[in-house]
Amino acid sequence: MGDVPDAREELDRLGRALRAQLVELITDLTPGSDLGLLFLDEPTVADWHDPLRHHYAALFRGERPASVGAADLTSRAAALLDSAGWQVTASQDGDGPRRWSVLTGRHDFGSIEIRVAHHISAVMFSGQTPALALRTPEEFTWPEPLRTPETLTPGYLLCYECDGLGACPGCGGRGWWPDEVHGRTNCRECRRQRVCAICRGAGQLAASLLSPYQRRYYSGSG
């Protein structure tokens, strides 16, 4: 598995552009907001299918000034996005006084959604960049056993669960299984611990410490 050339640099460029636009919107629409709470420092996984795709994403809550109505703030937000070259669509979420006005903006470097409440002062900002693959996929190779009959510690037996593998025998030490819908699903055998649940990654068990139940896995033992 290797890095995709220039992918991280491009993703960082998109992240900086998205952050700059969010800062401008938050500062203008909800003055006095603490921009230190705008967390957009590291990319996260957006798509768990191989190859993994990462994006920058953020969620921020601001407060509408008491002197500005929800409709006026929504119009101002739409004008700001439009003047910056965003394609803007407007919609409503809910009915009556508890509704939210929703603006969705799309640009080459991502998407932004602004939700303006009519019944409270909350203004919700969210944004994300396109998702990019940072590394090329690599076919999974099952690991070599940690222990074999020839490398057992004296007085020990190969683990009956993993047969000396040490890694989880269900997932091969990845901690997950491929999943067609979600890309990955947590391994139910090791619960993302990646090692065999019986020998805890040792690949072997002390014969003197086997329980009566465990001894049944070994023919000829005690």
Image (cartoon, grey):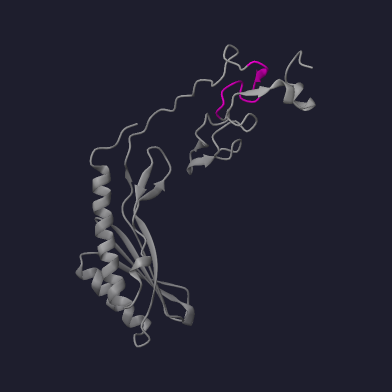
Instruction: Check the image and report above or below for 74 versus 139.
Output: below
Determine the residue positioned at 24% across, 74% down: 79
Stretch in magenta: 154-167
Q: Quadrant of residue 138?
A: top left
Q: How many marks?
A: 0
| Residue 171 position within the rendered picture, expressed as x and y whole percent measured from the top left | 54, 31
For the question of whether residue 198 can be seen, the reply is yes
Quadrant of the image occupied by residue 117: bottom left
Query: Residue visible at 49% across and 24% down?
Result: 142
Assign the magenta stretch its main secondary structure. loop
64 up-or-down from 17: above or below: below
Q: Residue furthest front?
A: 154
Left or right: where does residue 143 sit relative to residue 150?
left
Residue 41, above or below 60: above
Residue 33 lies, in percent from the top left, at 35, 74
Q: Is residue 152 above or below residue 52?
A: above
Nearer-the-camera pick, 113 or 60: 60
Q: Residue 211: give x, y in percent of width and height.
A: 77, 27
Q: Nearer the viewer, residue 57 or 93?
A: 57
Q: Position of residue 95 (x, y in %)?
A: 48, 77
- Which residue is drawn at the image coordinates 48% and 79% (left, top)? 98
198 or 123, nearer to the observer: 198
Q: Is residue 87 visible?
A: no
Question: Which quadrant is home to the N terminus?
Answer: top left
The quadrant the C terminus occupies is: top right
Indicate yes or no whether the magenta region holds residue 69. Answer: no
The verdict on residue 166 being magenta is yes
